[in-house]
Image (cartoon, grey):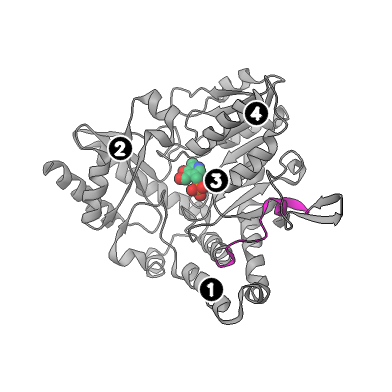
Amino acid sequence: MTLDIEQIRADTPGCINRIHFHNSGSSLMPKAVYDATVDHLQLELNIGGYEAAAQSAERIDQFYSATARMLGCAQSEVAYMENATAAFNSVFYGFARKLGVGDRILTANAEYASNFIAYLHVASITGCEIDVIPNDANGQIDCEALETMIDERVKLISITHVPTNCGLVNPAAAVGEVASRHGIPYLLDACQSAGQMPLDVATLKVDAMTVTGRKYLRGPRGTGFLYIRESAMDHFPPASLDLHGARWVELDRFEMSAGASRHENFENNVAGQIGLGVAIDYALALGLDNIYQRIQYLADRLRQRLGFIDGITLADQGIEKCGIVAFAHRQIEPAVFRARLGAMGINVGTSNARSTLLDMRSRGIESVVRCAVHYFNTEEEIDRLMESIKSVISNK
Ligand SMILES: Cc1ncc(COP(=O)(O)O)c(C=O)c1O
């Protein structure tokens, strides 16, 4: 199936006034996602929050069924969270209670700052060690090196699939293969990959995975989810519990809720949850294979064109590259590109070293421009972006 780009753009009001390449920051919602979110808020306005949730039970449930279909998992393995960091913290800090002196966490060079800060934090409390899996010559996780790092002290492999700062796609399934062969719990940050490529949990062999709603999934802000494999549920208890995650059954006893819902809070953004379910269904209707094919086609086109511009260095690593196109210019700061392109109606992002310190330090990069293409972008928009970039450079 080829994507009907005209229809998709008609479904996306944000395409009318802006050229949006800031999809790795926060993408444009389809109108249907906005409508579903606002409709629920309207219902809350009219009949009350709890009453609205009761009336929307099926639409809330649709979030779980859509997510389960996308991941190839059971609905009970999905928890709705307010963002990827909340999902990560719940699962990681819950797990980390078991860590002690000398235990090892293996992670990746392109790890996201919040995750790495959590490792450092836990290491400072428990005395565990953090070991970084080296990259291979292509700049992606070296799975042969990973294999040689495994010993009985490795208690967790926790990596980022697609980093926040470039188009690298780490070989998450190959890492999962190593983890499962050695029986080591495997946590994957799929925040930037969800919504731009298929994410089948059986293929990836992940035990837990964290995702945000607002990026490539095109959901509302302040939404996300957590996946935990049923067989890994006890490995990854929640960092904290409330009366939704557990039941107070006797004065001195509680029972955790079944499945991944033990990681959820009683209070959450129901309108956002419904909107995220619609966003996931929208992606599923288009097909994640189709989506990824189009994203890679557009991103390759942009990379090729950028490669011809004197003074620009592309910053994307790895064999497989996705929609995030990152570059730096010899003389012009990324923030200047962002501001000047923004003034021309083109949204791009920037990513600085602090978000991925290991990777950026090892490559001597302070900051990059992030032009993250989505399937609703067009060839013409890429041409406009290129003309605008050239004009920023010639008017520096
Ligand atoms: C790779 C990666 N992981 C995690 C996050 C955090 O996601 P959230 O802001 O939804 O907590 C981001 C956000 O940019 C990210 O790029």
Q: Pointer 4: what residue? A: 178
How far apart, in angstroms, are the residues tagged by discs 4 and 2? 32 Å
| Residue 327: numbered disc | 2
For the record, the magenta segment spans: 257-271
What kind of element bears circle 3?
helix
Q: Earlier in the sequence, mark 1 or mark 4?
A: 1
Whether 227 is drawn above or below 328: the answer is below
Q: Are marks 4 and 3 in contact (CB under 8 Å)?
A: no
Q: Which is nearer the N-term, disc 2 or disc 3? A: 3
Amino acid at dot 2: Phe
CA gap between label 1 and label 4 equals 45 Å
Q: Do the residues labelled 4 and 2 touch (CB within 8 Å)?
A: no
Residue 169 percent across, percent down from the top left: 48, 38
Is 130 or 239 nearer to us in this picture?
Answer: 239
Mark before the other along the chain sequence, 4 or 2: 4
Residue 327: x, y in percent? 30, 37
The one of 62 and 337 positioned closer to us in this rendering: 337
